[in-house]
Structure formats: structure tokens, C-alpha cells
Amino acid sequence: MSRSNDRLNGRSVKSLSILLALTVLTACASPIKPSPTVSPLVIASCPENLGELRDDTFGATTEKLVEVAGKPEWDWQAPAQDEALVAKLKDLRAVDQGYDLGEVVAAAMLDMQWHQLSADAPKQDVDAYEAAALAKTGLDTAHIPPRYRTTYFRHIWANGYASAYYAYLWTQMLDHDAYAWFVKQGGLTRANGERFRKMVLSRGSSLDYAAMYRAFTGHDPDVKPMLRAKGLMK
């Protein structure tokens, strides 16, 4: 195999990501309103994040890589049956997943700790409280700090995520579980996309979000597809 065929060049990867993101995101424009039982932050982010799975999920097939990255204007030609190259690309999905998950969990737990303080609690020493909060949750790991420190954690102080930063993790779980449903049902077919549009995107706040998701997939959300995607379980 030539050096040019041994790896995707930067333009190919970027083009592949953009194309696959647009494929899904063009169907994800429906506004979603709050629900009394499921955080709207969780559900509203799900269609967007499902699109952001891009080449990590929907595009990680030999056929799609050959179809997209094999276009001559992107200077990369893939052998028609190069499963080994596709396997290498799939393996890259697990790179740094421990760090990525750890920093988000640490930030989410830090958010929870701050918002457990009562309204009449005394003024806190920010750095000391943060250190104690991370130690309390077992997340004071030197090599994996929280994604946001208290002093610049704008999500929870000004952007509507107070005590709800965990919604990012919950949304990831929904994304991967929904993707697993697509895979089991044959992938990105018109029928599957139409079901997603009719049963999720077009519903707005007309149904309880948990019931809506359950009706779409036929089951409650399952964390296992997310853990598999992150390389944390087989």
C-alpha cells in the first residue's frame, strides 16, 4: 500500500466529518420544549449530538469511507476492500476516551456539589471548596482535572446548566443508544429516518420525552452502547 493510501489526509477526514454531520443534522431542526419529567437540556441536545457522532459511528464502514474519501478531488483512493484500514480508523475512536469521560464526570460532580449548598450557607473559599468537593467524590485526579474549574464554569453560573451539567453525559448515552437502534434496524435508511422524524423530531412537547424515546426505540435508554463506544466494555 502506498504512503498516501496508508492514512486519511486531513482534508479527507474533514470532508467526511462535514458530509456525515450534514446528513443527520439536516433532519434535526425540530424545536423541543421543556418536559416536567425529563430535563429539556438532555432531549434538546440529543438530535444535535447524534449528528455529531459523524465518522465515529454512521461513517465507520468500509462502504462509506470508500464512497466519500475515495473522491479524486480529496486526493485519497481507498482499496475497495481495505477492512484493515477501516479497523484502524475504528480503533482510533477509543483514543483518550478515559480522559474525555473523566473530565466531564468530574465537572458534573463539581456542579452537583456546589448546588447542594443551601441558600443560607456561609461564603465559601472557592479553591478550598472545589478541592474538597473533588476529593469527596473521588475525582481529585491530578492527570484528569475537571473540564471546567469553578472560577470559569460559565455553564452552571450563567448558561442555564445549574446542577444539570450531567445532561451532557446523559445525552451522550441517548445518542449512542439511538445509534445502536439505527444499526440494528439496518442503518441510515429512509424508513428509519422517517421514523425518527415522526416519533421524535416532530413531536415537540406533545409527549413526555421518556415515553417518546421509549416508543421510538422500544426500550428504556441503555448505557451499554455508550460504554462500548468509549472502549469501556466489549
Image (spheres, helix red, strand yellow):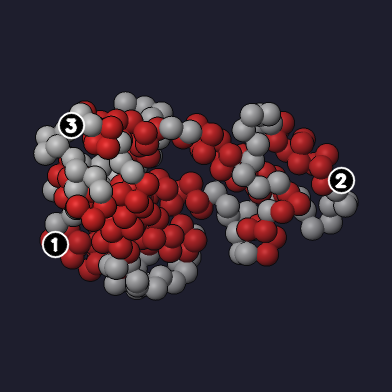
In front: 13, or 57? 13
Q: Is residue 84 left or right of residue 89?
A: left
Q: Looking at the picture, which amino acid does disc 3 mark?
A: Glu
Mark 1: which secondary structure? helix
Residue 95 is situated, as x and y percent measured from the top left of the image, at: 43, 32
Q: Looking at the picture, which amino acid does disc 2 mark?
A: Asp
User: Label 3 belongs to which residue?
Assistant: 83
User: Label 2 belongs to which residue?
Assistant: 125
Could you tell me which residue is drawn at 25 percent across and 48 percent down? 75
User: Label 1 belongs to which residue?
Assistant: 190
Res. 135 image quadrant: top right
Could you tell me which residue is drawn at 68 percent across and 29 percent down? 142
Disc 1 to disc 2: CB gap under 8 Å: no
Q: Is residue 121 left or right of residue 153?
A: right
Could you tell me which residue is drawn at 63 percent across and 58 percent down? 155
Mark 3: which secondary structure? helix
